[in-house]
Amino acid sequence: MSAAAVAVAIALSALACWFIVDKQLYSQVKTDLVSAPPAMVGKNLNLYANPEAALAANQPRPGTPEFSGAAPRDTQFVTPNGVGLPPGSNRAIVIKPEDAAAFQLKPGQYIVRDGHYTNGDPALVRLSSVQHVSQPTVAMVATPTQPIEESLQGLAILLGAVSLGGILLAAVAGRLVAHSSLKPVDQLTDAVEHIARTEEVGSTIPVNGDDEIARLSTSFNSMSTALANSRERQTRLIADAGHELRTPLTSLRTNVDLLIRSNDTGRPLPPATKTKLLGNMKAQMQELTVLIGDLLQLSRPDTPKAGPNLTVVALHEIAGRAVERAKLRGPGLVFETTVEPWYAHGDAAGLERAVINLLDNAVKYSPPAGTIEVRLQQGVLTVRDHGPGIPPDELQYVFDRFWRSPSSRQLPGSGLGLSIVAQSVREAGGEVTLGPAQDGGPGALATVRLPGGPAPE
């Protein structure tokens, strides 16, 4: 494509050059022809029926001038009665029917046209009126243009050769440049085909320079790395989920086997033992239900597209409902609540789940008869408990999936609650942090900031 564009450009340039030279040469010849002095005819002018006859009969007669003034270039005179040539003329000009209009020209006027000599050679002809004693006469002065045409033909050959050479050189140079420039594209294509064939995401290609190809290569490397990280997170999530599911499933299987074995052997379990066993199975089923719900919540995309679930939600109402549910889970705890109206855009169910998870976390780690402070002011929701707090070296992991502090692994939970909080808040365009209490006292402080306003928009 590039070679074709260069070929067209060179061909158009050569053609334009040829036309410019053609115009300049003919313009110069025409200027010289127009500026030539006028021919003057004498009294004795031999007339013939046509230029060929005049040329055949014309014989130079030295010492008997027939004209006053010089006969510039090739000249012939035309009258209504015939054609005459100056002595010694060896070329005659072909007369056209429209040349009769020249008899009406006034002195100083002229007509310039393309013409030919009687032998076929091309010429540029000037027609003008001259005075003659007996009849109107037209002087035809011609300049041969054969040298110009020969020069233009030579120029055409030269321009054609130069154009052909330029096109070939451009094609070779374009191929070399394209091969060098598109090498990163070939590498990118190979990498994409390799990923499509082997499904091994994470492959990258070297990036050289800062042009568009380099930007494309950088974007591909970023995409490939992101896909590799996504697959790694997916694999880790599946592995962690399998590990978390294995414990309750194993316990359930053990309890079910124990019940079946007691019935098969005819040795029924004592009622108290059976009741305790069934209670454990129910608790394990509830744990499985919560864990599966958490996994479904986390399986959603991290940044979903705006849709019908993203609406204006009253965060203060969500906080109020979450506090009421938390009171049922921690009946011996004291809840200090200060809630101001605040409206945000987000998924109402997801945000409510996030607030409930924060309160459940506070309830879980609060001491008996402890206090949980819940504040919602200017779009900032804070939940503070008075429990043991979080060690500083563990703060960076609190929002990771399935992460649980070594000191709290004996407590119920899957380690997904805070991950769901982070995801739900991020989907609503906000941010969440968890750290020690700001007053230096015991406990942890969770802070959620959501964009919005005190009135619905």
Image (spheres, helix red, strand yellow):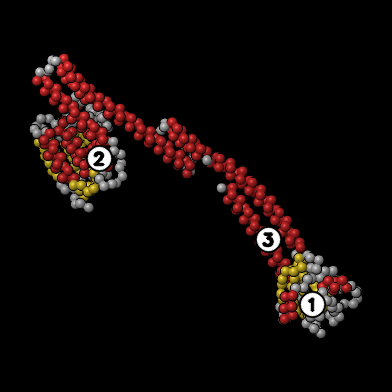
Mark drawn on residue 21: 3
Residue tagged 1: 78
Q: Secondary structure at mark 1?
A: strand
Instruction: Give the camera-side residue of 440 and 155.
Output: 155
- Between the residue at mark 1 and the residue at mark 3, the CA separation in whole angstroms equals 34 Å
Q: Residue 350's x, y, as percent?
A: 22, 41
Mark nearer the N terminus (3 vs 2): 3
Task: Identify the residue at image location x=9%, y=36%.
Answer: 334
Mark nearer the N terminus (1 vs 2): 1
Task: Identify the residue at image location x=12%, y=39%.
Answer: 324
Mark drawn on residue 63: none
- Between the residue at mark 1 and the residue at mark 2, the CA separation in whole angstroms equals 106 Å
Residue tagged 2: 424
Instruction: Give the camera-side residue of 133 and 80.
Output: 80
- The amino acid marked with disc number 3 is Val
**Which of the 4 image quadrants contains residue 373?**
top left
- The amino acid marked with disc number 1 is Val
Task: Identify the residue at image location x=16%, y=14%.
Answer: 265
Instruction: Identify whether 312 is placed above or below 274.
Output: below
Q: Is residue 27 visible?
A: yes
